[in-house]
Each structure stands twice: as structure tokens, then as C-alpha cells.
């Protein structure tokens, strides 16, 4: 593997998104080094990085510009061995063009078939052909999205860096990392800096994200455990939520510890976690980690450390974690621990979207749309339908068939 090209000293510019240097200069050397190090964790082969000339040729051939940190990443090494990694050196040009066109084509599909219309496009025409014509003309001016991996994209903004990585399916867009380095940690190791800081930074795509619930926000739910086994399950699910980058409040950790203690779950550190006064809730994370270790719940999970050397998991392992969490969120809906609308919203963006829209979850996600848009009866009726669909999914095979 080639080494990262030398990076000039960080210019004196105002801070940009997420604490990185501002957009008017090259990424800091530390950012380049972090991207190089993260490449060693990828479940992919690494070929020689693209030279500056090769990067320029790719941009000229396909008519876009890489963001600055995207260029540094590809210069460090070119991932290959999976069709999810764009092969900018030897890939089929037609396939790469189709990949680049996919985000806009997905929006146009929703314009034609699902009634999507951006308010800045003016009055929506009555006919679909005219609506498509206007939408296509408007979308020709939006910032290009450039694939990083699968349907995860970075804006193609020359000379800029620190943009969040987006997962885009038609008009369903979700944050997948504060920036490129945070995305790589999140996608391939399950760890994240905490995506609550992420903000859309490019025109049209910001609009799609405005309705997206903050992916790092904690899942509000009431304690439900009535047996030691349920209390242990609750602790494990909180650990998995933290693992995929969702925020779990210190108060939730203490509360889960208290319930487990009352139910006689055996862990030497459990009384310390459960008894933390509010002024010391900052210790909850460390004590929670000790409880996981004592209960054997951290086996195989990436460990927190100052050096942050996580376990390398493949995509199938992370997919299984997502499905396990989806099942838990469904249980929270069915047992009344979380509101149906809240639970299905989390499932839509952390399950359905993250798992590439499995058809088995589509009816549940569509019920959420019915609720928000006032279709198919009252909100209470839709909430009942969400509970019934969640119950049906839990009664079937797990994970459910993808067909």
C-alpha cells in the first residue's frame, strides 16, 4: 500500500464543520493520518492509492470534483474486492456513471411516483411529465454526491472537507457520520464520535435531512424488565445502541443498572452504577462498561480505549447487530415501553434505512408515513396498526426474509 502524500501544514483559517480546519485549504495532517489508519480496519483489499494525476483524470472523465478529504482517502489506498467500493481506476465507466447518477434518479423517481416536490421549485405542475422536466432542471444545479461505499455519499465540493457522509435512497437521506473519518469508524467498526454534531452542509440535500430524526439521539423508553433475564437483555441492548453510534444518556445507564440490581442480577459493579448520585453521572459510562464485562456481555464487542483499537467486524456481523436492535425496538413498541410513533421512527432510520430497505419492514415504515400525513384514520388507529405490525414481525422468523 502506498503511503499518504505529504500534507502541507494546517493553514490559519477559521474552524469549519465538526472542529476540522475551515474549507479553504487542505485537510490537516492529522486528518490524513487518521484516514490512512482507518483504512487498515476496512474489510477490503487495498490497492495503491490514486495519484494526483489519476484523481484529476477521474474528475475530468466523470464531470465532478472530490471533496478534499475524499481525495486524501483515495490517495492513501484504493479499496477493492467488493462491488460496494467504487473502483475509480479499473471500474466500468458506465457503471460508475450510473452510480453517480443514482441519487438524482432516486429523487426523480419519487417526484414521478410518490408526489415529492421541493418548495423552492415553485408551484407543482399538475402533469407528471412537466413536474419531471422542472425537477430534472433544478437537480442539475444541486451539489454532486460522490459515492464512498455503496449508497453512502460525500458531496463533491472541491477543496472542502468535513462534510457529513450521507446514506441516500431516493428522498430518504440519513446521516452516517460527522465526516469521512467518523463515517468509516461507524460503518466498519460501529463506533462514532457521536453524530449529534452532524449538520447538512450542502444545498438541496439539506432539505431531505431536515425531517430526519437525529440519529444519535437516545431512544426514549420506560424500563420494562420484570425478570433478571430481561434486565440483562436491557443492558445488552443499551450497549448495542452505543455501539452503532446512538447516544445513551447517563441517566438511562443508571436507571437500567438500578432495575437490574433490584432484580438480583449478579455483578460487583452494579451497585456502584445503580447508586450513582446525579452529580456523579459522568462516571456512568465507565461503570456500565465494567458491568458488561462482569456479566460477559462485552464478549466480541469493540472495546473503548484511549488508542481506540476496535475489533474488525465484517458487514454481515454489523447487519446482525442491526437486526437484533430492530427486534428490541419492536418489543419496546409491543410491550408499551415506547410510543409506537417513536419506535417506528427509530426503526425506519436505524433499521430499514441502514439495512438497505428490507421489504419485510416496509409495511411498518409506511404506517409511520400514514400517521404523519393523517392518512388511514386517526393517529390512535395508526398507532394500533403499528403495534399489530410489530407483533406480526416478532411472531415470524428472525431476521425476516428479505423478499
Image (cartoon, rainbow, N blue to C red):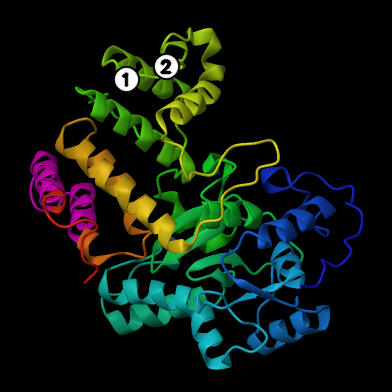
Q: Which mark is residue 180?
A: none
Q: Is residue 248 above or below residue 392?
A: above
Q: Mark 2 falls on what kind of element?
A: helix
Looking at the image, residue 183 sits to the left or right of residue 255; the answer is: right
Looking at the image, residue 108 sits to the left or right of residue 115; the answer is: right
Instruction: Tell me whether circle 1 and circle 2 mark residues in contact (CB < 8 Å).
Output: yes
x, y (%) of residue 293?
48, 30
Please name the residue that numbered disc 1 is placed on: 265
Q: Is residue 285 above or below residue 15?
A: above
| Residue 209 visible in this rendered orientation of the protein | yes
Residue span colored magenta = 363-392
Residue at 9% x, 53% y is 376
x, y (%) of residue 118?
40, 63
- Give the dominant element type of the magenta stretch: helix, strand or loop: helix
Pick whichever, 117 or 39, lies toward us: 39
Pick whichever, 130 or 100, lies toward us: 100
x, y (%) of residue 62?
64, 86
Please name the residue that numbered disc 2 is placed on: 270
Residue at 67% x, 62% y is 39
Q: Mark 1 falls on what kind of element?
A: loop
Query: Which residue sits furthest right?
Result: 9
Q: Which quadrant of the figure has residue 259? A: top left
Q: Is residue 260 above or below residue 363?
A: above
Q: Earlier in the sequence, mark 1 or mark 2?
A: 1
In three-dimensional space, the C-alpha distance between marks 1 and 2, rounded to whole angstroms, equals 8 Å
Q: Which quadrant of the figure has residue 41? A: bottom right
x, y (%) of residue 403?
21, 72
Amino acid at each position: 500500500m502506498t503511503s499518504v502524500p505529504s500534507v502541507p501544514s494546517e493553514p490559519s483559517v477559521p474552524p469549519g464543520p465538526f472542529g476540522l480546519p475551515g474549507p479553504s485549504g487542505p485537510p490537516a495532517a492529522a486528518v490524513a493520518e487518521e484516514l490512512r489508519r482507518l483504512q487498515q480496519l476496512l474489510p477490503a483489499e487495498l490497492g495503491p492509492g490514486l495519484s494526483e494525476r489519476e484523481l484529476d483524470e477521474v474528475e475530468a472523465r466523470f464531470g465532478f470534483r472530490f471533496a478534499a478529504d475524499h481525495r486524501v482517502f483515495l490517495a492513501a489506498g484504493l479499496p477493492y474486492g467488493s462491488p460496494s467500493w467504487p473502483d475509480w481506476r479499473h471500474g466500468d465507466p458506465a457503471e460508475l456513471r450510473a452510480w453517480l447518477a443514482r441519487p438524482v434518479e432516486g429523487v426523480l423517481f419519487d417526484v414521478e411516483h410518490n408526489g415529492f416536490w421541493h418548495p423552492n421549485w415553485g408551484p407543482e405542475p399538475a402533469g407528471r411529465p412537466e413536474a419531471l422536466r422542472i425537477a430534472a432542471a433544478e437537480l442539475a444545479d444541486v451539489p454532486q454526491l460522490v459515492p464512498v461505499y455503496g449508497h453512502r455519499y460525500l458531496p463533491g465540493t472541491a477543496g472542502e472537507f468535513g462534510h457529513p457522509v450521507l446514506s441516500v435512497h431516493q428522498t430518504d437521506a440519513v446521516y452516517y457520520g460527522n465526516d469521512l473519518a467518523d463515517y468509516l469508524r461507524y460503518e466498519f467498526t460501529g463506533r462514532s464520535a457521536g453524530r449529534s454534531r452532524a449538520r447538512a452542509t450542502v444545498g438541496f440535500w439539506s432539505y431531505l435531512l431536515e425531517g430526519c430524526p437525529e440519529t444519535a439521539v437516545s431512544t426514549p423508553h420506560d424500563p420494562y424488565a420484570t425478570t433478571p433475564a430481561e434486565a440483562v437483555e436491557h443492558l445488552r441492548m443499551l450497549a448495542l445502541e452505543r455501539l452503532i453510534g446512538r447516544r445513551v444518556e447517563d441517566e438511562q445507564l443508571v436507571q437500567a443498572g438500578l432495575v437490574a440490581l433490584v432484580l438480583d442480577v449478579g455483578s460487583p459493579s452494579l451497585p456502584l452504577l445503580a447508586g450513582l448520585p446525579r452529580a456523579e453521572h459522568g462516571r456512568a459510562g465507565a461503570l456500565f462498561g465494567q458491568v458488561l464485562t462482569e456479566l460477559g456481555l462485552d464478549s466480541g464487542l469493540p472495546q473503548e480505549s484511549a488508542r481506540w483499537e476496535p475489533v474488525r467486524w465484517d458487514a454481515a456481523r454489523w447487519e446482525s447487530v442491526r437486526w437484533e436492535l430492530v427486534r428490541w425496538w419492536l418489543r419496546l413498541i409491543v410491550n408499551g415501553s415506547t410510543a409506537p410513533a417513536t419506535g417506528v421512527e427509530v426503526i425506519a432510520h436505524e433499521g430499514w434505512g441502514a439495512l438497505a430497505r428490507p421489504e419485510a419492514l416496509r409495511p411498518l415504515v409506511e404506517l409511520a408515513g400514514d400517521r404523519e400525513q393523517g392518512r388511514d384514520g386517526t393517529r390512535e388507529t395508526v398507532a394500533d396498526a403499528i403495534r399489530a405490525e410489530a407483533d406480526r414481525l416478532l411472531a415470524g422468523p428472525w431476521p425476516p426474509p428479505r423478499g
